[in-house]
Every structure is written in C-alpha cells, then in structure tokens.
Image (spheres, rainbow, N blue to C red):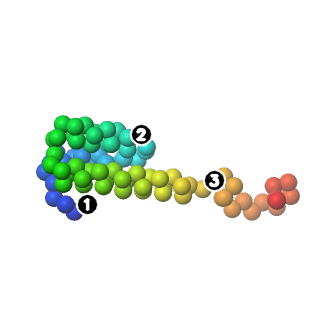
Amino acid sequence: MQQVALEPSAEHIRQVINKAQTGGQLKEAGELVDGLLRDRSFKLPELGLFACLLQKRTDQLTLDNSRTQLPWEFGDTSTDRSRQR
C-alpha cells in the first residue's frame, strides 16, 4: 500500500494518515477521508487505499498502546517485604 504511486494531493492524505500518533489525530484523518468520500474528490481505488491505511494505522496505534508497561511490570527487584507479594 505504501508503494502505490499517487497524485500529489492523494500523497498528502497518505502522509497525514501515516503521521497520526494519537487517537485524536487518527480521528481527524478519518474525518478528512470521510469528507473526500462525500465530495467524491478521489476515485474509488484511492479512497479504498485511504480506508486501508486508516485501518492499518488504527491497528498499529492500538497495538503500541497495549504494549506500554504498567507500573507493576517494571521488574521491581527491591527487597522491601511490604512490597513483595
């Protein structure tokens, strides 16, 4: 999907999607694609590509967020008995 040649305006949309780092940014990218769909600004293959990229980015962010360590997973090696189970 990343290697498909696109016209400059479509390439800009792809970059916006790929640069999304938060759920809010991803939501904005989705709203942008929704607007393009309503306005019929691009052909169906390009809109399909945008939809696939949005889903892929959503999955990546979800996976990245699920991999963050919780405070109790940092491997505390203290010998304080009150902190041991």
Q: Indicate the secondary structure of the residue bearing disc 3.
A: loop
Q: Amino acid at mark 1?
A: Gln
Tell me the residue that label 3 is attached to.
70
Question: Which quadrant holds the C terminus?
Answer: bottom right
Residue 11 is marked as none
Residue sitting farthest toward the left: 7
Query: For the point 66% across and 58% down, which residue is it?
Result: 73
Q: Amino acid at mark 3?
A: Leu
Mark 3 near mark 1, Cβ–Cβ under 8 Å?
no
Q: Earlier in the sequence, mark 1 or mark 2?
A: 1
Residue 2 is marked as 1
Give whichever of 43, 22 is nearer the camera.
Answer: 43
Camera sees residue 11: no
- In the picture, measured across the screen, residue 9 lies left or right of residue 78, that is left
Give whichever of 44, 65 is nearer the camera.
Answer: 44
Report the mark closest to the observer, 3 or 2.
2
Q: CA distance from mark 3 to mark 2?
A: 23 Å
Mark 3 near mark 2, Cβ–Cβ under 8 Å?
no
Give whichever of 74, 45 is nearer the camera.
Answer: 45
Q: How far from the left and from the top, in percent, is residue 74? A: 66, 58
Question: Which quadrant holds the N terminus?
Answer: bottom left
Query: For the point 18% across and 50% down, which residue is it?
Result: 44
Q: How far from the left and from the top, in percent, is residue 75? A: 69, 62
Q: Indicate the secondary structure of the residue bearing disc 2.
A: helix
Is the residue 78 above or below the residue 41 in the image? Answer: below
Tell me the residue that label 2 is attached to.
24
Query: For the point 18% across and 36% down, which residue is it?
Result: 39
**Count of all numbered marks drawn on residues in the image:** 3
